[in-house]
Amino acid sequence: MTIPVSIELQHVKVAKRLLEYIERKLSKLDHFLPDIESAAVELSLRAGVRSLSERKVAQVTVHARGKLLRAEETSDDLRTAVDRAIEKIHRQVEHFKGKHTARRSVRGGLPRISAMLAEAPEIEIDDEAAVDEIMRRKSFKISLMSEFEAVDQMLLLGHTFFVFLHADTSHVNVVYRRKGGGYGLLLPELA
């Protein structure tokens, strides 16, 4: 099966053979994880960065079985950045496959994550100052999943938080990594 690959260029021009190279490399992921739905690559040039090794950026995102795998790498050469990002995706695929194999072998089930989650701390935000500080807006799709799956997805992406639809309640929830260790769960309610 061929994986649909979209490649977006931002402030950078590349040779056609690099685009073909990227598609070939990503098509090989299908051998490791057959349920890949699509892959997206964003190649960009960071403005205002002095270090040449951090100017060229390759971000690779893979959608598979409702999961999201993402890697970003920088280099002075786009091909090197792409290779490193795809290598990170390979490691995430292996981690993802290993987790699912290990989870199936556990007997007696796993304790509910909610038992380990702590109350979210109260945070006061000055609304006017917060709006001035928003540097980027990003839209994304969220999926129904359990708290355990949300923590797993957060760790897989290497993020400190993850937004998801709770499978039991169909409400938007956020899991996050606490500075003191462990995880937290935010349960938004209308005021």
Image (cartoon, rainbow, N blue to C red):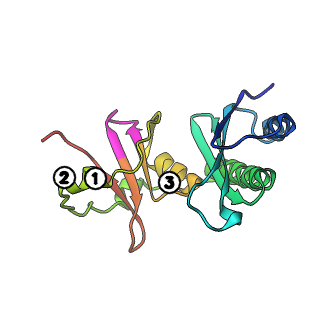
What is the distance, in whole Å, between disc 2 and disc 1 at their CAs?
7 Å
Side of 109 relative to 115 (left or right): right
Q: Are marks 2 and 1 in contact (CB under 8 Å)?
A: yes
Side of 16 relative to 138 (left or right): right
Amino acid tagged 1:
Asp
Measuring from the top left, give residue 73's x and y in whole percent. 68, 56
Per the image, label 1 sits on a secondary structure element best described as helix
Q: Mark 1 vs mark 3: which is more N-terminal?
A: 3
Mark number, residue 158: none
Per the image, label 2 sits on a secondary structure element best described as helix
Per the image, label 3 sits on a secondary structure element best described as loop
Please give the residue where the numbered disc 1 appears in the rendered image. Answer: 132
Camera-near label (3 vs 2) is: 2
Please give the residue where the numbered disc 2 appears in the rendered image. Answer: 128
Please give the residue where the numbered disc 3 appears in the rendered image. Answer: 110
Instruction: Between residue 166 and residue 133, name the one nearer to us.
Output: 133
Amino acid tagged 3:
Leu
